[in-house]
Amino acid sequence: MSDISSPPIARVDVVRDVHHGITLEDAYRWMEADGEEFHRWLDGQAGHAREQLDALPRREELLTRIRELGGTLPQYSDFTPAGDRIFYLAREPGAGVLVLMVREPDGASRVLFDPDTVPGEAPHAIAWYVPSPDGRHIACAVFPSGSEESTIQVIDVGSGAILETIPPTTRFAFLSWLEDGRSFVFHRFVAPPAGAPPEQRRLDSRSFLHRLGTDPARDEVVLARGLNPHVELTPQDRPFLVVPPRGEWMLAIVSHGALGPWTSEQLSDCSLYVAPRAALADPATCPWRKVAGVADGVTAFATSHDTLYLVSHRDAPRSRVLAVPFAVPDLSRARVVVPAGERVVEAVRVVGDRLLVRDLDGGVHRVRHAPLSGGEPADLPLPVEGAIWEVTTHPERPEALLLAAGWTDAPRLYRYDGETLEDTGLAPRSPVDFGDVHARILHVPARDGTRIPLTVIHHKGLVLDGDNPVLLTGYGSHGMSELPEFRPEMLAWYERGGVYAVAHLRGGGAYGREWHEAGRGLRKETTITDFIDCAEHLIALGYTRPGRLAGEGVSAGGIPAGGALVRRPELWAAMAMQVPTVNATRIEFSENGPINVPEFGSVTTEDGLRGLLIADAYLRVEDSVPYPAVLLTTGRRDARVPPWQPAKLAARLQAAGASGRPVLLRVEEHGGHGAGSTREQEHALLADVLAFLLHAFEASR
């Protein structure tokens, strides 16, 4: 890498904290104030990184190829049927952002909303959308790229006119339309008191009822702390109201953890309540009945007219499906509809008189279906060995849409009619040929003997001579799983002999609740050592060697990647960490921090501090250690992992540098945590990462 410039040196101003008799020294605490000095330093780091990355000999070649590959396949997702229409998001070749589309009953499709039409300096993106059950109206959340603070646009589907605009709300809106198609409930944050510290800016959120044609400022609060004595809430909790399209009941979901529910299949650390929907007329006296608490381990739900179906890991680490009547929601008397087995039950849907069940089997999805009346679930043959990214049911018809994709298979949309799957033809076939690329799952032993699933993707003719460029990635937090995702741009890596390896670490969700708990809190060391053990097996199996091996971590994936960097620096030629969590002991003092306490812990408890110290890469950096080349990225608007997290690690590594290898901090000026990035932003980031890694491999020869 060239010596065009040097990165700006960060001021050292040591702050000492004492927690439970342990002294922590933080040389760059001043960055957390997010003041002018920090942003000047960040500007200098951004300029230095851009200068260095632009000078890499293979960057332009890679960017050209990535644009070719990524610009040929239209991107379609988020298919939702309503009325006689199908709605979806689309990004055509050459387009920067996803637009909202509607497919009419005659098969004609048209653009319903384009976020590029929203005025403002930064590009805008669609966060989510929800059509009314009759398909006549749609609520579409739009945010400036990087911010994730969404404005809800209410659109008349027939004319395409924007009827209303609701001021900024939240990425976790969980909006539900009522049966009249002219009112909905949604969740939003409220404005914090003036001068509130970052960790208090996301407290006491609420759910509101909005009626079309009324002033959003006068929306009625329907769920909030202190509103109803039957629903228990703390300031950190987020209350969501769900009104199913059928039946006489509604649900309240209280999220106590970091993962607010995007959909009914992504619950975590939640409590559930039920009540007659007619009681919405008086939210303060609504007779909510608690169905489940955090200890009941509910992770997904579905509803029929009179029954609530719950996926629960209580007494079943890989989960099972329970059924309780809305009228008598006693979980202790629930009927077991789908018993626990070897697979992890992830999601359930009611489709007519059938129950559709999605399982996770190591690193891939399986689907089963069974009659609601009972009976052994049968496997539904899938056309793809990969992931079922979406399962959406029609609010009025006994059918569902399933979006399936694999590491080497482009997404296809299938219609399920209660018996079989049929390709709808709505998702275009990929012109990018992955015929020579192979994906398979290895099961490699960790140091304690546990078999860790490790997906490897590469050209079929790869020779295991120990000299292949390998990029190993992993996440290992929140019980989340790394699912097969089709990325045509990655062919640029495989064409150059690259191997992409995905470690399904403990702390994630590959094998259910036990897998998650095995890498949580005080057991976070297991997540990190799993990552290291997978790297060592890739070397032992002949895939690569330390001089040709790089690690990657995104967001909470910065914990295993950063942990491996500081524990085994000699194992890596390079490390690329994108918007990473690397200063775990300070997470709870950030805007998104309090809701992460259930997952990572708090410095206010001794065990919490011990777990956070395990996860904190920044505090483990030592002077005079020859660390590998490191590329860190951040978004100027990132509210989930604030820029000072990777910035602190960059400053510390640059100050400690003994290897002469580069430490770069790449800054996305109009970016955040990744959501809403334009196609060009995505392509430029991938080109930077791959060029950086290839250059580091060459320097290690």
Image: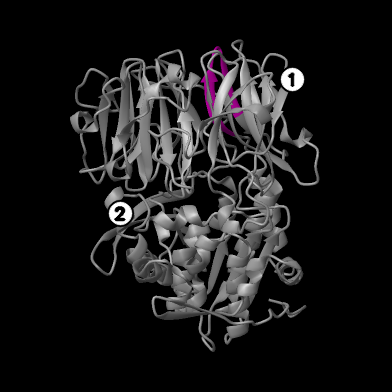
Q: Nearer the viewer, residue 548 or 108?
A: 108
Q: Nearer the viewer, residue 523 or 295?
A: 295
Above or below for 425 versus 642: above
Q: Within 10 Å of the Cα at label 2, are there few (<14), some (14-19), or many (20+) other Cα atoms?
A: many
Give yes or no for residue 299 being in the magenta stretch.
Answer: no
Magenta-colored span: 76-88
Question: Which residue type carries mark 1?
Answer: Ala
Question: Which residue type carries mark 2?
Answer: Trp
Q: Which is the main secondary structure of the residues drawn in magenta?
A: strand
- Contact, mark 2 vs mark 1 (Cβ under 8 Å): no
Asked if residue 145 lies left or right of residue 184, the reply is right
Disc sitting over residue 161 in the figure: 1
Q: Is residue 475 visible?
A: no
Q: Nearer the viewer, residue 136 or 686?
A: 136
Percent position of residue 408, x then y: 48, 44
Asked if residue 22 lies left or right of residue 622, the reply is left
The residue beneath circle 2 is: 515
- Mark 2 or mark 1, earlier in chain: 1
Above or below for 606 versus 474: below
Above or below for 38 versus 372: below
Q: Quadrant of residue 415?
A: top left
Q: Is residue 115 visible?
A: yes
Q: Which is in the foreground here, disc 2 or disc 1? A: 1
Report the quarter where the C terminus lies.
Answer: bottom right
Disc sitting over residue 518 in the figure: none
Give yes or no for residue 87 being in the magenta stretch.
Answer: yes
Q: Residue at x 51, y 86 (%)?
A: 625
Q: Residue at x 68, y 21 (%)?
A: 214
Percent position of residue 135, x then y: 58, 16
